[in-house]
Image (cartoon, rainbow, N blue to C red):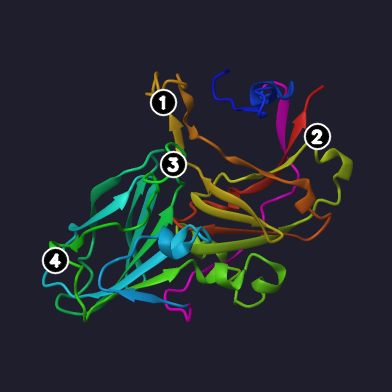
Amino acid sequence: MSLQSVQIYDYNQHLLLDSANVSNINSNNTVIVPVVTGPLDWQFFVEPSQTNLPKITASNPLEQLNLTNDETIYLWYRRNVSLCRLSAHTIVQVQTRRANSLLFFLDGQFLGNFDNSEHAQGTITVDVPLNLSQFQPNQQYLFEILSVSLGIDNFNIGPGHFDYKGIVGNISLDGQSLIGNETNVWEHQKGLFGEARQIYTEQGSKTVEWNSKWTTAVNKSVTWFQTRFDLNHLARKDLNANPVLLDAIGLNRGHAFVNGNDIGLYWLIEGSCQSSVPCCCLQGEIRCGQPSQRYYHIPSDWLMPKNNLLTVFEDLGASSPGSVSIVQRIVIT
């Protein structure tokens, strides 16, 4: 097989598809051109902390996939905490899984996050420093954790090899255990308020109040952004040969939707600069120092000539939403 390729065979072992040989289109004979003039006109909506969505309570944090049933990659954990001492380097220690992210909040204020992008299974124990110096000791605060599943390992699938996500064991804050307390329980919320309201659709977007001063939401975590764009100047028949893409530069990590359709998870994680990747099938640098992927395909069937609705949910915070654009990949003949 060619490097970084996929082959599909039928039951008789006849080759049906080799992704390394699907066309003569590659990065050397294509150009990326903007198709929307000027910056996109964004508005934003901050994901609320307190909602009326259904909750599940337990004395210990519950595993994520058993609660979400593959309907969302997000799960909120919430519990009240009170600490005797609060410092600029307070450690939260938590048992979680590989390919998982945890975002930490206290009374709605974002404190920090942990990310693991390994394509593997396994439980890991992590220490995450949080700056709690601005809070007061011996007062009760709402401690919130947003768990984000970053993918499920696809090796060794079968009984005994089921993957897990979220908090899967002990958790402590400044050495204080946060499990096993029957009077101070954990609250679990499946998914996001914006997901439940489907604010990425035409009807759902009308159910919340959007703020047009989007520059005030730069680098703000758990925030929805929304805008519209026209494509009536493009020939419809050319969209399959010259696809329209979302250029996500300026974003960080989250979900993107076009006209209510889910493009999927985007993540502008920096590419590898290793001279040799520790895998049997990959060697060499992969977009060293650049986002491993910044362009995301938008199927032409999802697009309309005018008034297309683009919605993104940023969990980590977007550094420059104004840099995001709609582009087209043009094949040079």
Q: Which residue is mark 1?
A: 273
Q: Earlier in the sequence, mark 4 or mark 1?
A: 4
Q: What residue lies at 49% left-to-right and 69% top-to-bottom?
A: 47
What type is the residue that disc 2 sits on?
Ala
The mark lying in front, picked from 3 and 2, is: 3
**Residue 153, labelled with which disc?**
3
User: Would residue 227 be found to the left or right of residue 175 on screen?
Assistant: right
User: Would residue 301 be found to the left or right of residue 283 on screen?
Assistant: right
Check disc 1: other Cα within 10 Å, few if <14, some if 14-19, many if 20+: some
Q: Earlier in the sequence, mark 4 or mark 3?
A: 3
Q: Which residue is mark 2?
A: 241
Q: Secondary structure at mark 2?
A: loop
Disc 4 to disc 2, how far (Cα)? Answer: 58 Å
The answer to whether mark 3 and mark 2 are in CB contact below 8 A is no
The answer to whether mark 4 and mark 2 are in CB contact below 8 A is no
The mark lying in front, picked from 4 and 1, is: 4
Judge whether residue 47 is colored magenta: yes
Q: Residue 311 sits in which quadrant?
A: bottom right
Quadrant where the C terminus is found in the figure: top right
Q: Earlier in the sequence, mark 1 or mark 2?
A: 2
What type is the residue that disc 1 sits on?
Cys
The answer to whether mark 1 and mark 3 are in CB contact below 8 A is no
Q: Which residue is mark 4?
A: 176
